[in-house]
């Protein structure tokens, strides 16, 4: 019986559509074919006979049995939609031409957009490329920004409400359930209107939405554009809304550089969700990224029957053999050249170390002799003898050569905002000039090698200059501690021998000073440099090349917006990291520095799940840093990793 009633209602509706075709509205708009139907009305193609142009007309229709209160509510909603669209100034919003009253109902006359919806486009032609999806997303974002500026929330951003015009223009339509600031609600009490797959978690919980709710829907739209399916679809509305509120989204497989944007927009916490500025910067970066190299033309199947000239086949075999032999010879020559270059560099470093060691010993002998001289009366300290008086000239020349190698390495620092590339933790001894020193005496606020910046106290050190010799037991003034000799210890290359615990530091921590990257910081005992970051932009410290680890990058030309720098870099990191998952990308306060942002994410490295926080900040125009701390994800909240993060951020000091 119920099926029969529905069939009759559908037939009556179809008959009504047929009767309305050709109808003239307000003596001006003649209805043509039906363009589409929705839950609250029908959209017609029509002809404006006054201006001679084709338009779209949206008709409000009442379902059978609707009461007068509901009719008034639907009329109010339709008029609100027309007013909302008319207030939006954006090329991505449809233009409203007129509103006419016929049969006690409003009819909205609008600009006609010739083209399919995004949902139809994807269904018929397949998912969009990440770049095209980013272009669509940016166009929708333009409309949302204009709408939010007018106090209007769309609340129904989804692929079927985005039209792709034949000329490529992207238009956001259907503000039928939009919420306008200052207007009373016209949604039925207890009703949640919208497509469940694109309703934000806060709306699903019944909370009052704001602009972040539309940003969530935009993230769902981008997901569907590249994947061909919505981010959440559990069959029923209730199951889908439950998943939206409680479950992580399935990782997109086709998003590529758009992955970071999607994760950022689909953050369940509105406060951590990407806002307009961050989403815009990241979408623009995807659009402006170089095109992917097209896949090579498919080669014929190995089983395909073909005719091949024996002469041509013989020539091809000979050419292939010659090419292989040439490539092998070139590889061997390159390997031999590399080995010889490494040998020469190793010898040069050893000569420089020997020269520096000899200089230190000679200086120590001279200082000891001076200390033994009688102090009958106060007088100025004797002038130190020229270096040539205590060192052979050839030794000096070798030391200078070593210093030039160091300067060349420091000069090759990459000039990107904050690198964030921690490599893979391989051993990399011998790179980048002199290594860090590990000190057990300078205070956390001072420096063992240079002046501290950023409001910290300043200390001078007799070891200033980036010597590879670890500074063992020196005081901030550069004087020797009791029982210590400035010349003791052997050079450790990039590593650093542990010092004594520093007063005020947690047990098991020592101060590491690295003049190459202009910083000092307390790290766990046993930490030493195990790799170089990026193109020698920083150093990675750990016990054995694994986790936990600390990476510090230095940039002498930092950008003015740390968060924007991270946002621009994020798509590349997301695309190159296995099982990448964004946790947060937020501006934070840190020591009053002009711009600071924390980028927190998870990914798989060395076969384990790792959690990372990367703090990028600008100290001044010539000092920018990124401190990246990585721990096994299941140890992130453990005592060791928690203490390491706190100590690193508390004790970090920039150096000149």
Image (cartoon, grey):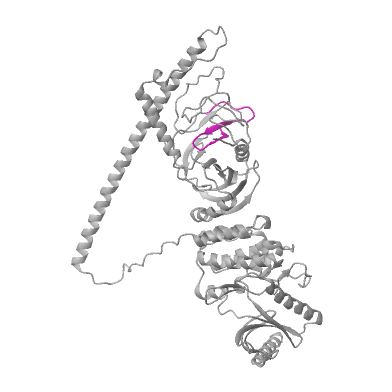
Is residue 557 magenta-colored?
no
Is residue 524 magenta-colored?
yes
**Quarter of the rendering occupied by the N terminus:** bottom right
User: What residue appears at the point 63 percent right and 68 percent down from the top-left corner?
Assistant: 143
**Quarter of the rendering occupied by the C terminus:** top right
Q: Is residue 232 visible?
A: no
Name the residue nearer the viewer: 200 or 46: 46
Q: Position of residue 48 (x, y in %)?
A: 63, 87
Q: Is residue 466 visible?
A: yes
User: What residue appears at the point 54 percent right and 40 percent down from the top-left corner?
Assistant: 550
* On screen, residue 398 above or below 17: above
* On screen, residue 255 above or below 489: below
Quarter assignment of residue 184: bottom right
Q: Which residues are magenta?
A: 498-525
Q: Position of residue 484 (x, y in %)?
A: 53, 19
Quarter assignment of residue 51: bottom right
Name the residue nearer the viewer: 42 or 324: 42
* On screen, residue 550 above or below 263: above
Left/right placement of residue 246 relative to residue 513 reads: right
Left/right placement of residue 22 relative to residue 383 reads: right
């Amino acid at each position: 019986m119920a099926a029969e009633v529905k069939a009759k209602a559908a037939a009556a509706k179809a008959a009504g559509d047929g009767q309305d075709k050709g109808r003239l509205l307000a003596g001006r708009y003649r209805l043509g074919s039906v363009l589409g139907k929705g839950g609250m009305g029908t959209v017609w193609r029509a002809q404006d006979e006054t201006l001679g142009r084709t338009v779209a007309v949206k008709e409000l229709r009442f379902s059978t049995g609707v009461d007068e209160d509901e009719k008034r509510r639907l009329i109010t909603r339709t008029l609100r939609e027309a007013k909302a669209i008319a207030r939006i100034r954006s090329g991505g919003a449809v233009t409203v031409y007129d509103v006419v009253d016929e049969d006690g109902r409003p009819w909205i006359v609008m600009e006609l957009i010739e083209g399919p919806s995004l949902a139809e486009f994807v269904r018929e032609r397949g998912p969009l490329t990440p770049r095209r999806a980013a272009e669509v997303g940016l166009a929708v974002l333009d409309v949302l920004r204009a709408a939010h500026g007018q106090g209007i929330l769309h609340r129904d951003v989804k692929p079927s409400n985005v039209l792709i015009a034949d000329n490529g223009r992207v238009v956001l339509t259907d503000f039928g359930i939009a919420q306008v600031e200052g207007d009373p609600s016209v949604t039925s009490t207890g009703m949640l209107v919208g497509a469940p797959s694109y309703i934000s978690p806060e709306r699903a919980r019944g909370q009052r939405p704001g602009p972040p709710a539309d940003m969530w829907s935009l993230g769902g739209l981008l997901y569907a554009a590249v994947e061909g399916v919505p981010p959440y679809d559990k069959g029923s509305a209730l199951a889908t809304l439950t998943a939206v509120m409680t479950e992580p989204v399935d990782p997109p497989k086709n998003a590529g550089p758009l992955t970071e944007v999607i994760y950022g927009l689909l953050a369940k916490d509105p406060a951590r969700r990407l806002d307009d500025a961050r989403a815009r910067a990241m979408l623009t970066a995807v659009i402006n990224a170089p095109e992917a190299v097209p896949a090579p033309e498919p080669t014929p199947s190995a089983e395909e029957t073909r005719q091949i000239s024996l002469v041509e086949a013989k020539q091809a075999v000979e050419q292939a053999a010659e090419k292989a032999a040439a490539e092998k010879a070139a590889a061997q020559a390159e390997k031999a050249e590399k080995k010889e270059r490494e040998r020469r560099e190793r010898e040069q470093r050893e000569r420089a170390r020997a020269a520096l060691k000899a200089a230190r010993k000679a200086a120590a002998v001279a200082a000891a002799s001076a200390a033994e001289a009688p102090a009958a009366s106060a007088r100025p300290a004797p002038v130190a003898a020229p270096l040539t008086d205590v060192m052979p000239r050839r030794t000096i020349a070798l030391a200078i050569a070593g210093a030039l190698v160091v300067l060349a390495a420091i000069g090759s620092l990459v000039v990107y905002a904050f690198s964030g590339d921690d490599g893979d933790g391989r051993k990399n001894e011998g790179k980048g000039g002199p290594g860090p020193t590990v000190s057990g005496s300078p205070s956390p606020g001072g420096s063992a090698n240079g002046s501290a910046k950023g409001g910290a106290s300043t200390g001078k050190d007799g070891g200033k200059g980036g010597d590879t010799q670890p500074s063992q037991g020196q005081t901030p003034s550069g004087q020797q501690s009791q029982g210590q000799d400035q010349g003791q210890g052997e050079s450790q290359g990039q590593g650093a021998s542990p010092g004594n615990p520093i007063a005020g530091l947690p047990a098991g921590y020592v101060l590491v000073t690295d003049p190459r990257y202009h910083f000092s910081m307390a790290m766990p005992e046993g930490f030493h440099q195990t790799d170089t970051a990026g193109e020698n932009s920083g150093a990675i410290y750990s016990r054995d090349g694994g986790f936990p680890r600390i990476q510090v990058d230095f940039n002498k030309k930092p950008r003015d917006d740390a968060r924007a720098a991270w946002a621009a870099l994020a798509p590349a990191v997301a695309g190159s990291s296995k099982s990448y998952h964004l946790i947060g990308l937020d501006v934070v306060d840190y020591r009053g520095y002009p711009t600071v942002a924390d980028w927190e994410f998870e990914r798989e490295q060395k076969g384990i799940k790792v959690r990372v926080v990367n703090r990028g900040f600008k100290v001044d125009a010539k000092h920018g840093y990124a401190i990246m701390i990585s721990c096994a994800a299941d140890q992130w909240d453990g005592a060791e990793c928690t203490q390491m993060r706190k100590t690193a951020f508390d004790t970090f000091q920039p150096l000149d």
